[in-house]
Image (cartoon, grey):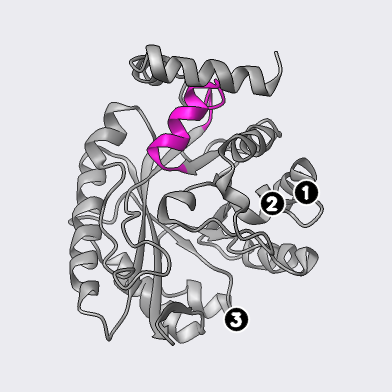
Amino acid sequence: MSFADRLADLVETRVHRPHAIAEAAARRVRRPAVPGTRGRLLLVAADHPARGALRAGDRPLAMADRADLLERLCVALSRPGVDGVLGTADILEDLLLLGRLEGRLAIGSMNRGGLAGTVFEIDDRFTGLDAAAIAAMRFDGGKMLLRVDPADPATASTLESCGRAVSALAERRLVAMVEPFISYRVDGRVHNDLAPEAMIRAITVSSGLGTTSAYTWLKVPVVADMERVMAAATLPALLLGGEVPADPEAAFESWRKALQLPTVKGLVVGRSLLYPPDDDVASAVDTAVGLL
């Protein structure tokens, strides 16, 4: 069956048998532990569209074609060494119906309300999955974006919401994956401060969220002076890929170096793997796997 035929079946299932999503979640074969036998993880991130962030490299609407995105995700998840995917409910449910989450980790994206380019971007509401839904769907954890803007009062409510989400996930023994930044507005647009000192501050703030940090993991970018940055916490961390790099080889080398640090346990990469400059998803994924 072609991929187009499988997508057509998926749409018909959504129309006529929406309950099939919960049924697929109930019978999904889960991994026995998050880190797995290697102690290292490679997750593919695909939660960008729900925040209105559709750009990949020089393609402003790359992620707007859902069929193309799902096909790229299926290629990535088929490669040896890929542990799972991070996505919003719609993405994870599509992959469930396509049978691509068997034996893989599924991390649900929780706050997507801070839409890219809006005046309310820092007020990052929890508009996606919550801890109860993540547990009910038998997913493996939840991810949240935390941008701390010292000049934006909305930061306070986002901090509080992230703290509650960390606690709710921990109550269910589910991973809480926090992606922290110190952020500022420049000409009306939000920019993340990637200076080492800013990342250290972001990591220390996010590490203290919630009633316990027992199940908290960090999702951090590769910046300068990573050894000093990652010394700011004892929590396990995954490196994020960010935008499609102009020089993929340089990006891979920076990941390789950061992966040598004791708290860095793997990668969460989205656009860099799904939309590489040469469009060879399998090769990009295999290179990332090789770094682990």
State the separation of the CA atoms marked 2 and 3.
Answer: 25 Å
- Counting other residues with Cα less than 10 Å from the Cα at mark 3, is it few (<14), some (14-19), or many (20 or more)? some
Do the residues bearing badges 2 and 1 touch, measured as CB atoms within 8 Å? yes
Q: Secondary structure at mark 2?
A: loop
Q: Earlier in the sequence, mark 2 or mark 3?
A: 3
Residue 213, picture quadrant:
bottom left
Q: Amino acid at mark 2?
A: Tyr
Q: Which residues are magenta?
A: 87-104
Do the residues bearing badges 3 and 1 touch, measured as CB atoms within 8 Å? no
Q: Earlier in the sequence, mark 3 or mark 1?
A: 3
Q: Secondary structure at mark 3?
A: loop
The count of marks equals: 3
Task: Report which residue position mark 2 lands on.
Answer: 275
Task: Report which residue position mark 3 lands on.
Answer: 224
Quarter placement of the N terminus: top right
Task: Report which residue position mark 1 lands on.
Answer: 279
| x and y percentages locating residue 13 in the rendered image | 45, 15
- Counting other residues with Cα less than 10 Å from the Cα at mark 2, is it few (<14), some (14-19), or many (20 or more)? many
